[in-house]
Amino acid sequence: MWRSLASNMLTILIVGLFLFAGVILWGKNEYSSEGPLSEAICFQVPSGTNMSRVSRKLEEDGAVSSSSIFRIGVKYSDKAQDLKAGSYLVEPGASMESIIDTITRGGASTCGTEIVYRVGVTRVLAEVRELDPATNSFVERAEFVPGVDETPAVYTEKKAEADTRYRIALAEGVTSWQVVESLKAMDVLEGDPGRRPAEGSLAPDSYEVRPGTSREAVLTEMKDRQDKRIADAWEARSSDAAVESPEEMLILASIIEKETAVADERGVVASVFTNRLNRGMRLQTDPTVIYGVTKGEGVLGRGLRQSELRGVTPWNTYVIEGLPPTPIANPGLESLVAAVNPEQTDYVFFVADGTGGHAFAETLEEHNRNVAKWRQIEAERNNN
């Protein structure tokens, strides 16, 4: 009898162990396999919440099949203390494992509201936009010029929300004065920006910021990025470069940046200036003359006068030989690379072609024909 009872108990124990192992395997599969979510959602993790409340909300939103398995997975992955407040894009079919990684990894939120300050050559524009999870594209809620336009209510509303993200998008070709003045207009930043950075020393790029970030810290990050770009571009220079130092490269790159907004033209424009420098010709470029008039403080807003084209300034390349003494704007990486890796051409002239690009020429005769075409296009536009 005792032998039979012991045999039955052993059988029950073995069956129980198999069932327990099966449950564990099922749980592991549920944890790592495709989740039940059919459409992307923007999942918010409020500040001060805990993983237990997060797991229940995920189950309510249909993102996980079991909040209990989710919590067990969090425990065994040892990520319970790594929960980060923010708004996160949860993709269709996301597994519990991937969701845990998303909400504990840290860094910027991946969905929700974003306020972007776009610093352009003519103005700074603030945009309030939200990511639509269904299309994974941004929907614009409002835009305005800080310090000029009336502040939209949605901007004030979203600034009060803890998970709103902030980004500064710095365009190629802006001057250091424009950058500093733009940062002053951004009420999400704090502090005095300090001394204006040297022209050309700031990297056009996208910068994530947080409320309370100091203006000086933003400028420091911009300078650090530009320093690295300058060093990398100079290291990769070709033997065809006409400039003899990183400083000269930066000056030439700023001129290239201001002369063309067409990415594919940068290397050709660089070749024109390289050929002119090698032949001892003056650069004769209008953007340098404009900088001599404005010193980079604002936009000229009109055509150059003949007196300005003839006027002597350190930046008037119709008068001076070679490069001006300083950059005339903050060039992007592509212009830095073009300045020391020009295309191989015999062009020494170029003029606008009416399409946003330029017509290039090797001879003065050819250039004069291109200029005549451009003047005809201008005249037709003025008559319409």
Image (spheres, grey):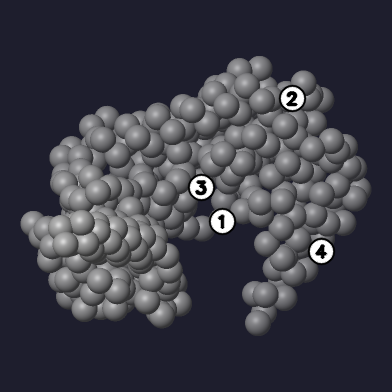
Comes first in the chain, label 3 or label 1: 3
Identify which residue, 228 or 175, lies in the foreground: 228
Comes first in the chain, label 2 or label 1: 2
Q: CA distance from mark 2 to mark 1?
A: 36 Å
Q: Which callout, 1 or 4, points to the residue nearer the camera?
A: 4
Residue bearing the label numbered 4:
373
Q: Quadrant of residue 271?
A: top right
Residue bearing the label numbered 2:
238
The amino acid at mark 2 is Ser
* Left or right: 145, with 299 as reference point: left
Q: Residue at x 13, y 62 (%)?
A: 52
Comes first in the chain, label 4 or label 3: 3
Q: Quadrant of residue 252?
A: top right
Comes first in the chain, label 1 or label 4: 1
Q: CA distance from mark 4 to mark 3?
A: 29 Å
The amino acid at mark 4 is Lys
